[in-house]
Image: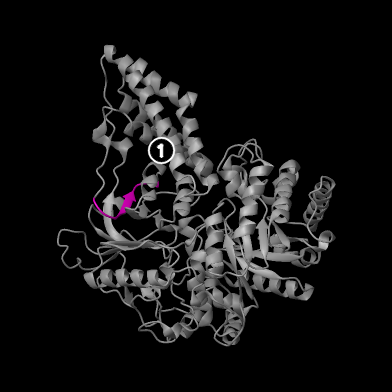
Amino acid sequence: MKKNKPKSASAEPGGPETGAADGAPAGQVQGDGSDGARVSGDGADCDGADGDGAKGDGAKGDGAGAAARAKLPLTEAGAGITQDSKGAAEEPKDKAGGQGEGEPAAGTESASPALILKGTPAVPGLAVGLCHCKAYDLDRAQVGRVPRDEVENELNRFHRALADSNEELLALKERLHGRVPADHVRILDTHCAYLRDSVFLSDVENLILNEQMSLEGAIAKVIADFDRIFRLVQSEVLRERAVDLRDVGIRVLRNLRETEVLEDEEPEGDYILVARELSIVDLFSAAGSNVLGIVTEEGSMTSHAAILARSLRVPTLTSVPDLLQSVQEGDFLVVDASEGALRVNPEERVRAQYLAAREEAETEVDSEIPEWATGPHLTRDGKTIEVRASCASLPEVERAAELGMDGLGLYRTELAFLVEKELPSVESLTAHYAAVCEQSRGETLTFRLLDVDSSLGLDYLHRTREANPALGQAGIRVLLEKEPILRRQLQALLRANMESSQLRPLRLALPLVTDPGDLRRVKEILFEERLALRKVGLGPKGDGDKAQPVELGVVIETPVAALGVEALALESDFLLLGLDALQQYLLAADRENVALKAAFECLHPVVLRVARDVCAACEAASKPLAVFGVTSIYARNIPLLLGIGMQSFCVPPAGLHDFLLATASISVRREEQEARSRMEAGSGQEARAQREPSRRVQGFRHGYGGN
């Protein structure tokens, strides 16, 4: 069996010995798109599981996608990619912005010319196949009038379709049992609730009764009105509700017995599903064997559909601008959902190379840990790097174990709270955390406590949406304000660890800590909860607390925490550096704002100096420090972080291969000089200008793609 061990990037085909790629957005190691994001239970997160191999004209996969990309060519003539003297990938852009254009692919005279479109990875992976565009049912609904004597018939059709839709959802839940986590399947309960929603039902019925509107038109109008209202409010949770309601409307329309014309015929064989938005209605067809990948023009990393896509392990790319205007039925697509790139109609040579790379990567996926993932993980000059898993769901934890990742450096606990409107019970939380404990491997087991703000609309935490949720009652602030919820989560985590067959310390990370007093108060509550468990006979295994100690740490993600890190380090057992959030607050730049994306592509000198000071404070206090976040595994940032003394990284399983390839080509001694030079720069532009010349002689490795 051929292996792909990332000891040196010089082993890559056709390329010289390389350092970390340092191009524009094409210089990033892509992992969990939501890694470190406050609102992403998700976050964010994305599992890297085994693919299904090549099938006919298409192939799909996720965990092996990084290995596949490492074997692809350095240039892609015809696919719109060229290589410049710096080794960075340059993509020709049209005046619309963001699309590289080349010659039409061979044998596809009627197809669109070759394009490269950029999007946001929702589920990393690689999929290759033909395009199937899913029509938008609400747009096609006929807004007509019906005679007065047909009104009753329209109402009867409505209620029959509601009943059919409810039965369909229940059957779907049963079919998915055992295939995706139970917490994810419960998302369908939200759709069942909308089928009984009094406002939705009455609005549709009133349009039929009072305006004699056709049922199809009434449903389309009601959902469009809700959608418009929700989108006017800058709230992700309201946008999510609009998407859920739209999904329900589409399902009802498809169950109208006289409207089979609304159904699209699926193509024979495997295909890439292209749609305006990631809809749960369409997504569940991906549970079969035909859907290789999903690409959407709109969508959110935190949407319910994105969460289910991660569970189904279908490579998914969202938020691709002008997607539906750029592709057409039958186009040949290469979906690189790890790089965040969609290639439309590349030339035959490039198609063959992607398919061959996909097939070769499939042969490397077996029950054993891949050779490239085995440790120790070393830089070019022999420095050891600690690499632990960053996960947000049970499938991600399972994939981390398959890759032999030594320990769970960060598990984001939001998902169990986001999939339902009601507060999860201690029993359900315990069961979920116990599964995480059992599936993870290594000595490190770190859970970040619930980290949400008022934009999510969790009524048991926030009664109303605050004016500025990100700077309001969030993280540990709201947990201390709603102490029973904090106690419930602590009880579940303690019980889960005690029930685990693996005896190891439980590490709890506190989000959004701004003062040592927050940490002291949580210590008191934790002591009380451990004492209460012992009183009811649920104390720790072994001889006293020494058998299963609990360590408390803090997440450094705000300027005040970074400036006061010495005091926090004295009080805590360990620290985590949330690089994404820290950059956002230091730069006063919203990381979700596409217009400000460039601010996060390479570490600003001030951000780097702050991160260096955090490293120094932890070293002085002899407290372990690890960094996490999407920007921490960008290929151009890894050398800088190593250069300031960072030695421990929390990496999503899907981004592990690219991360190891990057670190294996880095000389820490050289990067220490680079980091000092960058920190002395007066501005971000000056720092980039200093760094560019030193990188021009180094090669480019395909796979460090942009978002």
Provide residue 483's location: percent of width, then percent of height. 75, 43
Quarter of the rendering containing residue 464: top right
Q: Is residue 82 magenta?
A: no
Quarter containing the C terminus: bottom left
Provide residue 31's location: percent of width, then percent of height. 50, 64
Quarter containing the N terminus: bottom left
Q: Is residue 386 shown above or below 380?
A: above
Provide residue 226's location: percent of width, then percent of height. 44, 32
The residue stretch that appears in magenta: 268-278
Q: Secondary structure at mark 1?
A: helix
Provide residue 323's location: percent of width, then percent of height. 32, 53
Position of residue 106 in the picture relative to residue 643 (left or right): left
Quarter of the rendering containing residue 679: bottom right
For this rendering, which residue is in front, 632 or 411?
Answer: 411
Per the image, the residue denoted by label 1 is 247
Q: Is residue 270 magenta?
A: yes
Quarter of the rendering containing residue 222: top left
Which residue, as the protein is rendered here, is positioned at the far top?
Answer: 149
Position of residue 670 in the picture relative to residue 314 (left or right): right
